[in-house]
Image (spheres, rainbow, N blue to C red):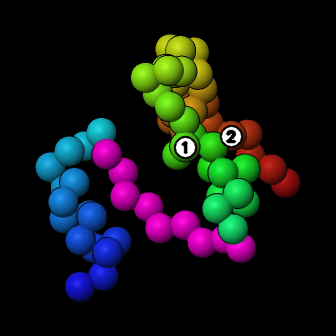
Amino acid sequence: MDLCGERERQYAEQPHMEVVLLGADSEEAIRVTHPTYFRDFEAEPFTLEEYERNIPWLNPQPATS
């Protein structure tokens, strides 16, 4: 049984949890490209503005030509 699938099943009933599989040359590279996965939310919670800014359907990207 693979770990990612195991974690998906473990957190399936918790909609606030997201299981992702990321690949990179180093953990530091992932920390640079995906910093929110490493954020200490108790020490540094999102503001409502930050939260809303990261919701795609509230902030659709303009079409590029």
Q: Nearer the viewer, residue 28 or 64?
A: 28
Find the magenta span and give its range. Answer: 17-25
**Precedes in sequence: disc 2 or disc 1:** 1
Q: Residues within 10 Å of mark 1 (few under 14, many from 20)?
A: few
The residue identified by callout 2 is 61
Residue in the foreground of this view, choosing between 49 and 5? 5
Q: How many marks?
A: 2
Under circle 2, the secondary element is loop
Residue 48 shown left or right of residue 65 in the figure: left
Q: Is residue 19 magenta?
A: yes
- Rendered location of residue 56, percent (x, y): 54, 38
Amino acid tagged 1:
Phe
On residue 38, the disc is: 1
Specify whether 39 is left or right of 19: right
Is 53 rendered above or below residue 4?
A: above
Measure the alpha-carbon separation of dots 2 and 1: 25 Å
Counting from the top left corner in percent of width and height, residue 21 is at 47, 67
Q: Is residue 33 visible?
A: no
Residue placed furthest toward the left: 13
Residue positioned 26% across, 64% down in the render = 8
